[in-house]
């Protein structure tokens, strides 16, 4: 399989054939950005200006705290909190709420510097995936061998750069739908079987692959793993 600076990260996330490869790609980009923000970018004025204005969501704040040094996170928070205090929510307010400030605050609450960056980078990665799928038979085979594509990334793969796929759009749609739709059918069967196992008439039946079907379904629907204790059918 041909490799260059663009294709190497794509091959790296598709090679393991474990779960949704696009989720692995997103996780890789998120970790790199969180490390960058709390590392070398911390003292870059243009980056700090953007992080002060946009802030971070809970997911990415958590990742930054986990991956970065506490002082780095504290310095980022110091300037971010200062901007909010001075421009949006001063301590001494009189009169009616400022509509523009309240609208800006609402926008900030739902904004995230890393989310914006990941969205742009994931769309660029999708364009590379499309190009590799069209040009490289080996990658097309590797793509077809993935366990599944989660619902979120099925939508991303099918809605970004349709023009780039051109005449290959129907075939790419068929290949991607097979991964997502096929796994969806598997999940439906496992969830249905899990529910049926609570019928007293199935007390001694085989659980099959249904015991972790809730966790797998949530991961498929959201692109996020949830941590739960292993299901014990003896305690149902």
Image (tube, grey):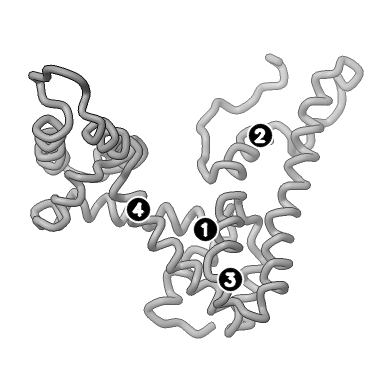
Q: Residue at x 43, y 68 (%)?
A: 124
What whole-number distance in Å separates the C-alpha atoms at marks 1 and 4? 17 Å
In the rendered structure, find residue 162 and report the number of the disc placed on it. 3
Q: Which of disc 1 and disc 3 is earlier in sequence?
A: 1
In the rendered image, the quadrant that contains the N terminus is bottom right
Q: Is residue 96 left or right of residue 232?
A: left
- Location of residue 57 in the rendering, given as x and y in whole percent from the top left corner: 33, 39
10 Å crowding of disc 1: few (<14), some (14-19), many (20+): many
Residue 55: quarter of image: top left
Q: Residue at x 67, y 66 (%)?
A: 145
Number of callouts: 4
Disc 3 element: helix
* Residue pointed to by mark 2: 212
What whole-number distance in Å separates the C-alpha atoms at marks 3 and 4? 21 Å
Q: Is residue 59 left or right of residue 186?
A: left
What whole-number distance in Å separates the C-alpha atoms at marks 3 and 1? 17 Å
10 Å crowding of disc 2: few (<14), some (14-19), many (20+): some
Q: Residue at x 8, y 54 (%)?
A: 43
What whole-number distance in Å separates the C-alpha atoms at marks 1 and 2? 22 Å
In the rendered structure, find residue 116 and report the number of the disc placed on it. 4
Q: Which of disc 4 and disc 3 is earlier in sequence?
A: 4
In the rendered structure, find residue 22 and report the number of the disc placed on it. 1
């Amino acid at each position: 399989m041909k490799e260059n600076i663009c294709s190497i990260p794509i091959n790296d996330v598709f090679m393991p054939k474990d779960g949704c490869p696009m989720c692995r790609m997103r996780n890789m980009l998120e970790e790199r950005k969180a490390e960058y923000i709390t590392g070398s970018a911390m003292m870059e004025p243009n980056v700090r200006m953007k992080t002060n204005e946009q802030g971070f969501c809970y997911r990415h704040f958590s990742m930054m705290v986990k991956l970065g040094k506490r002082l780095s996170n504290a310095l980022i928070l110091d300037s971010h909190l200062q901007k909010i205090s001075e421009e949006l929510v001063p301590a001494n307010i009189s009169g009616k709420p400022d509509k523009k400030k309240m609208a800006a605050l609402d926008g900030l609450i739902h904004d995230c510097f890393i989310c914006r960056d990941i969205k742009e980078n994931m769309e660029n990665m999708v364009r590379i995936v499309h190009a590799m799928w069209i040009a490289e038979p080996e990658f097309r085979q590797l793509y077809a061998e993935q366990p599944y594509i989660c619902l979120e990334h099925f939508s991303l793969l099918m809605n970004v750069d349709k023009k780039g796929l051109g005449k290959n759009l129907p075939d790419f749609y068929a290949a991607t739908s097979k991964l997502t739709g096929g796994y969806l059918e598997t999940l439906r069967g496992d969830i249905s079987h899990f529910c049926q196992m609570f019928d007293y008439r199935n007390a001694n039946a085989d659980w099959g692959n249904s015991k972790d079907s809730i966790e797998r379904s949530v991961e498929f629907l959201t692109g996020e793993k949830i941590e739960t204790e292993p299901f014990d059918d003896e305690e149902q």
